[in-house]
Structures are given as structure tokens and as C-alpha cells.
Amino acid sequence: MDFLVQNFAVLLFSLLAVLTVAGAIGVVTLKNPVHSAISLLGTFVMVAALFVLKHAEFLGAVQLLVYAGGILVLFLFVIMLVNVRKLRPESAFLSNLAPAAVAVGTLFGVMVALVMVLSRLAGPGADPTALRTVEGQVLGNTEAVGWVLYRTYLVPFEVVSVILLVAMIGAIVFGRRQASLEREEEGGQG
């Protein structure tokens, strides 16, 4: 029991990391797009839990609100707009490239492991309180991010939000135009 108490944070991190990777694998391997989107939701939630575990509460909340809330709803909207049932079946994966994909993935995993080992051998990392410091005053994580975001970078933040709004409206307009063109073609053939 002492082992469990002493290593609870490491065990919880390991469990969340395994669940995150399993969700990510489900995103790319499931054939039904809705099931893949639900797997993506699980991945987003696990990443948010990892952020909270590492004392980045603001990033965890943003992960849930923006990605699990907004982006996933957008993905589901697109899945429903495309009408997957009418698409002609394609080969599920580029099967002739599968060995190359496995080799590249293995190489990438070895490189990540090597970087992790080398960073452990390099010694202690940066001071985490530096991320919570604004103008020499130590604040909470959320306060520091809010201070920098809404004071220093307010104009770029608003410009990006307007650009995203225009892109979303454009996607809706193009999607509706494409659907109306398809209906006209079907009506003309009958």
C-alpha cells in the first residue's frame, strides 16, 4: 500500500497517458467516423486530465471548452453535412504504405524516448514558478495566462477570433452551396 501512496501521481499519469494513446489510436483505426469522433472526445478529455495533473488548470479547462466542446462539435457537424453513406467506398488505408508508416512511427518513438532519457540525464528542468510570474509578481496559473492574454496580446487575440469567425461562416456558405448544387444535379438526372 505504501508503494501505491508514494507513486500515485506517476501511476495516474501513466494510466491517463495509456488511455490518451488508446483514444488516439481509435481515432485513426475506427472505420465509422462517428465512432472515431467519440474516440477523439475521449482523447481530448484525457489530455485535459493530464493538464490538470501537471497543475495547468487553465489549459485543462481550455482543452475541454475549445477542443472537446467546440472543435469536436464542428467535426460532428462536418460528418453529418458530408453524408458519409453516399460516399463511394475507398480502400480503408494505403496498405502499400503501411510498412513505411510503421517504420516511421517506430523511428519517431525511439527519438522521443531518446529525448526523454537525455533530458532526465541533463538534470533538473526549468523553474515552474517562472510560468506563473507576471511583472515579477507570482500569480496563479490562470491569472498569469489571463493577464498576458488580455493585456499584452489583446489585439492579436481579437484578430484571430475574427479570422476564425469569417472562416466558419465561409465554410458554412460553401457547404450549403455544394449541397444545393448536388440537389440540382440529382433533380436534373431524374
Image: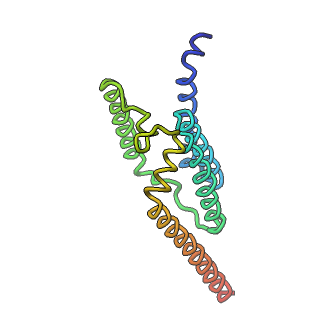
- Residue 31 appears left or right of 95: right
103 or 74, which lies in front?
74
Q: Position of residue 147 (x, y in %)?
A: 49, 50
Q: Quadrant of residue 180?
A: bottom right
Residue 177 seen in this snapshot: yes
Q: Quadrant of residue 86?
A: bottom right
95 or 75, which lies in front?
75
Residue 82's place in the image compared with 72, above or below, is: below
Residue 21 seen in this snapshot: no
- Residue placed at 58% from the left, 35% from the top? 19
- Residue 80 appears left or right of 10: right
Residue 14's place in the image compared with 56, above or below, is: above
- Residue placed at 64% from the left, 58% from the top? 73
Furthest toward the top, the residue is 2
31 or 24, which lies in front?
24
- Residue placed at 66% from the left, 65% from the top? 80
Furthest toward the bottom, the residue is 188
Q: Position of residue 119 (x, y in %)?
A: 33, 29
Residue 77's place in the image compared with 141, above or below, is: below
Q: Colour mode?
A: rainbow
Q: Position of residue 182 (x, y in %)?
A: 62, 80
Q: Position of residue 30 (x, y in %)?
A: 59, 49
Count all numbered tags in the image, as a single digit: 0
Q: Quadrant of the N terminus?
A: top right
Q: Quadrant of the C terminus?
A: bottom right
- Residue placed at 47% from the left, 67% from the top? 159
